[in-house]
Image: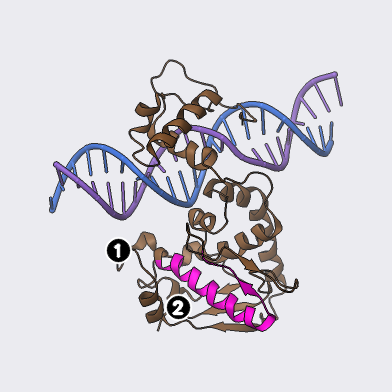
Chain colours: A brown, B purple, C blue
Amino acid sequence: MENKRMRRSYDTTSVVRKGAWTAEEDMLLKNCIDKFGEGKWHLVPLRAGLNRCRKSCRLRWLNYLRPNIKRGDFAEDEVDLMLRLHKLLGNRWSLIAGRIPGRTANDVKNYWNTHLKSRCKQQKEQLKEGEQSPPTMVTIIKPQPCTISKALNLRPHITSHDPHNLITSSNIDSVDNVFNISKDIVSSPKLSIDNIDEYLDALLEDRVKEIGHEVGWSFGGRSAEGGGLDVLEQVDDQNSLFDFPIDDVVMLDLLD
DNA sequence: AAAACCTCCAACCGCCAAGCG
DNA sequence: TCGCTTGGCGGTTGGAGGTTT
């Protein structure tokens, strides 16, 4: 598909080309990835015969050329999932995108910034106005940390205390009416983003199975790529996969 | 009709962590 | 241990196209 907008002008005098990609460049990049596979991005410009930097090639592939990328408007359930994940993870776009099949981190980020940021702000203000009545706590989820570490294949590079990998109070400032996570808990060095990633799978799967039992859902399998839930056949049509009522508070007791 | 303003999103930029010699 | 390279991420920009005035 040709760029719908050819916005940026090219600097033809520089060695490394910038700006919008042409169909020809796309083809060269795609052929290169098809032949050599993803990765080794520093070699890609050379292999593909492109005057582009490695980052530009990588970005173009990940955000545009990669197969199975979904384009067009976000579906209602995708938006719903995005909202909930954002409340839990903050601006961790790549993590959020990893749970929305076919969507890239850039897509998610753009959608958030253009559609949901203002909506979220608005909701927050409304909540402040009616702050007198505290939200009702309806669900308590208490997974056992030892189960997570045993049951899940945590990646080897997880560090015990990596400040950049932690959800901190600063990036959960939007945690309000859905996930009420104490700052003490989320800033604990025991919980890294990698844990969160795996943890979400376990948490959602457990929760969905639990709910599914009650309402009579049947389940498919895990996706090969992300390891998360990928199929859920709903027997009745009254609930969606992540249909926690928006006003519920889900207390996550992540640690012992 | 056209100027001003708004929306959208591809692409760029800077930073960080991991890996390697 | 240190410095360099690479991959990856989130924030931001810029400009085409759409809408309003």
Is residue A168 at all visible to an observer of this figure? Answer: no
CA neighbours of label 2 inside 10 A, class few (<14), some (14 to 19), many (20+): some
CA neighbours of label 1 inside 10 A, class few (<14), some (14 to 19), many (20+): few
Residue range (magenta): A195-222
Q: Give the image location of residue C16, x and y in percent.
A: 66, 26
Q: Give the image location of residue A47, x and y in percent.
A: 36, 28
Q: Give the image location of residue A9, x and y in percent.
A: 54, 22
Q: Which residue lies furthest to the top in this view?
A: A13
Residue A229 image-quadrant placement: bottom right
Q: Is the magenta stretch mostly helix, strand or loop?
A: helix
Q: Is residue B16 left or right of residue A123?
A: left
Which quarter of the image is occupied by the C terminus of chain A?
A: bottom left
Q: Give the image location of residue A138, x and y in percent.
A: 64, 84
Q: Point out the tag, 2 or 1, that comes first from the N-terminus.
A: 1
Query: Which residue shows up at 54% across the image and 65% down it?
Result: A173
Residue A211 is a magenta residue: yes
Q: Distance between the residues labelled 2 and 1?
A: 20 Å
Q: Is mark 2 on a helix, strand or loop?
A: loop
User: Residues at badges 2 and 1 in contact (C-beta under 8 Å)?
Assistant: no
A151 or A53, nearer to the observer: A151
Disc 2 target residue: A254
Q: In this view, does A101 lie to the left or right of A47?
A: right
Query: Which residue shows up at 61% across the image and 46% down it?
Result: A70
Disc 1 target residue: A156
